[in-house]
Amino acid sequence: MFNKVRARYASLAFGRRKFPQKPRTDITVEDIIDQFTDVKKIVVPTTKVSSIGSCFAEEILLWMKDNNFNVIEPKWGMVYNPINIRLIVEGGLEYDKFNPAERYWDFGDGDIRTPYIKSSTELSPVRLGTNLEQAKIKEAKLFSDFGKVLRNVKLLLLH
């Protein structure tokens, strides 16, 4: 009913031979990738790498960490839109010029939060403190940490 079609790279590399030529449980990443590309690798285990974005960005970073890559772990949690990415980058690299339209969310009960950074533990906006002075200090520290990550990575994965 359906025709089985091989990927073009597999057809060109293997012709009519069976692909791959070892049991499925023995296949490694090198068996699949290294045979089909002459592209210079942009990431090697010593490359300082981090990511920013949705759960995919977090998952790829976890995979890289589990596979002994030089991961610099960010503290910005999941980031779902380009505006928040821009705010994190601007705040991290140029905090003295950072002036978003909405700086804090004050819930009026001693709970001040930032609308731009989601906590990775609570899955809600990061708590900055119980009063405005605490919030300013914690926000400055938070963006300082972001700046350290951004300045130290060689590759920042955006997704």
Image (spheres, rainbow, N blue to C red):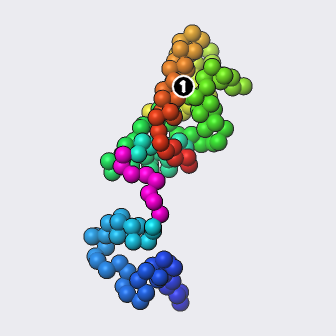
| Secondary structure state at the residue bearing disc 1 | helix
Coordinates of residue 151 in the picture (x, y in percent): 50, 33
Q: Along the horizontal axis of the image, is 32 left or right of 111? A: left
Residue 49 lies in the magenta stretch: no
Q: Which residue is mark 1?
A: 143
Coordinates of residue 42 in the picture (x, y in percent): 46, 53
- Using the image, determine if residue 42 lies above or below residue 115: below
Q: Along the horizontal axis of the image, is 42 left or right of 135? A: left
- Using the image, determine if residue 8 lies above or below residue 79: below
Coordinates of residue 12 in the picture (x, y in percent): 47, 82
Which residue is pictured at 36% across the width and 49% down the height? 45
What's the magenta region? 39-46
Which residue is pictured at 47% across the width and 83% down the height? 11
Which residue is pictured at 65% across the width and 24% down the height? 98
- Using the image, determine if residue 43 lies above or below residue 92: below
Q: Callout 1 environment at 10 Å: few (<14), some (14 to 19), or many (20+)?
A: many
Nearer the observer, 2 or 38: 38
